[in-house]
Amino acid sequence: MEAITNIAICGGTHGNELTGVYLAKKHGWLLANPAAAAVCRRYVDCDLNRCFSLLNLNGKNTGLENLRAREINALLGEKGTMNAPDLILDLHNTTANMGVTLILSDEDPVLLGISAIIATEFSGVHIYLQPESRDESPYLGTIARKDICIEAGPQAHGTLNAELFLKVERIVFRFLELIKGDLPKVNCEIETFKETQNVDYPRDKEGNITAMIHPNLQGKDFCELKAGMPVFMGFDGKEIFWEGETCYPAFINEAAYYEKGIAMSLTHRNLLHLPGSIVFN
Amino acid sequence: MEAITNIAICGGTHGNELTGVYLAKKHGWLLANPAAAAVCRRYVDCDLNRCFSLLNLNGKNTGLENLRAREINALLGEKGTMNAPDLILDLHNTTANMGVTLILSDEDPVLLGISAIIATEFSGVHIYLQPESRDESPYLGTIARKDICIEAGPQAHGTLNAELFLKVERIVFRFLELIKGDLPKVNCEIETFKETQNVDYPRDKEGNITAMIHPNLQGKDFCELKAGMPVFMGFDGKEIFWEGETCYPAFINEAAYYEKGIAMSLTHRNLLHLPGSIVFN
């Protein structure tokens, strides 16, 4: 297995996601957006976690987060160069009921194997595949050759949840342990959820939302959504039913995504067979 | 019973508490802080719901919310004058597990009686007494001669919860129905929670919090807290136990109160006997 030695752990890429903010402070990990953390907001000028495409890093956009993105890129080694870190773990929170979700930007067999071990050792862990063009991806983690975004929820932004805090901390340290080579053999099927598309809220002509997540769907992240099941409820109480293909939604009712036009992300559920040889060749 | 005819209903006093924001938009009620709602933040310059003391209204403080407070005061009639509204209902959300909590600023027998009826008709409704010097109180509702703040939770700020939205809406309309005189006789004991003090998080010398709400206390609003029960958990996992008198905490882990130095508010639980004659004399 290719050595992974240069590892960066980041928290507070969003300043109101306090699990990462306080874990970064506790362990001296990189507090990615201290200015936003100081005012307990997601960002000051723009979303830092949308600033890391190569185009943007090499561009001239200003504003606090664009400048900070270039600073972090220089600090960690520089995306796309030999000096880039081997791995970034970036810690996030969500208001959605996603438990601890490990988001992989590709199907890297090493990270898949390690994630599978984590998922068997800890309850409520999901593996989420979000295929990315690495150069174009705007996420902080893509500075590194490999990355995992760790989403923990449900947690209201601006709050801490002691159970999630301690669980994410234990998962990060178990990750480091596994990365450093103390690798049990795995030969198992693992459940993965691959993102296919985002779904917006119903909106009027002015762009205002006209419906909420349906009570039957609220909190049902990673559960099956089939045609005919209720998905939204209008402010008038009218129900809207799902007409698409069967899928497994996540990021349901994430606070920060109202402004991005995302009511939920849809995924396909897959069972991957992971023999030890794929993971540890 | 004294006539209550001039009633104002307000939502969005905090711009990221979306139940009130969207109910106000739906029904044409007063959207108290449209500038904060537009950016989905609690406030722009300072907390609007701390701007309504007579001293502040008659002062010269600037900033968006202080100016808006004077504008709302003029619009609704003016606090402390004959033109003040009879009643304000102000709609809020909390990240704490408080269900629908009716906050009364005094033990007005009419509002207590009506609140008691609401609490028998709807599940998960609490009556919370927060004694206030009306002139000095900074809350928007105190513009009026009587007021009720309706807190609904748990709901992450910046999100909507369809069940809470529809429940608060039904409660407001039932309130108006009862106020307008369609009053069933009540002769019952009602449970009330009277605020006694606020409790801050443990902090270091620089003012940084050093502990989180203990998992055993999280979500246990309005439950009994006795000496010896765990109340906080340090970032190192160390437990801190309650040493005070038996009480019933609320606003546990409210996101907006981290900056105010409030981890929870303590209350005493009381049973009040409400004969029909007190309510409807």
Image (tube, coloured by chain):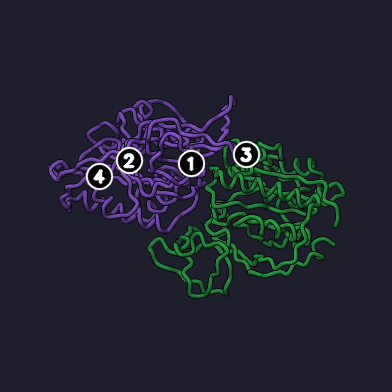
Chain colours: A green, B purple
Instruction: Report, in whole angstroms, how far the alpha carbon at label 2 lies from the one at label 1.
Output: 17 Å
Q: Quadrant of the C terminus of chain B?
A: top left
- The vertical placement of A199 against B25, above or below, is below
Task: Please tell me the numbered disc located at residue B190.
Answer: 4
Co-location on one chain, circles 3 and 4: no
User: Which percent across, then down, holds residue B96?
Assistant: 44, 45
Q: Earlier in the sequence, mark 2 or mark 4?
A: 2
Disc 1 is placed on an element classified as loop
State the residue position of label 3.
A22
User: Which percent across, then down, holds residue A242?
Assistant: 50, 71
Task: Please tell me the numbered disc located at residue B253.
Answer: 1
Mark 2 or 4, closer to the camera:
4
Instruction: Report, in whole angstroms, how far the alpha carbon at label 2 lies from the one at label 4.
Output: 11 Å
Co-location on one chain, circles 2 and 3: no
| Residue type for callout 4 | Ile
Label 2–label 4 contact, CB within 8 A: no
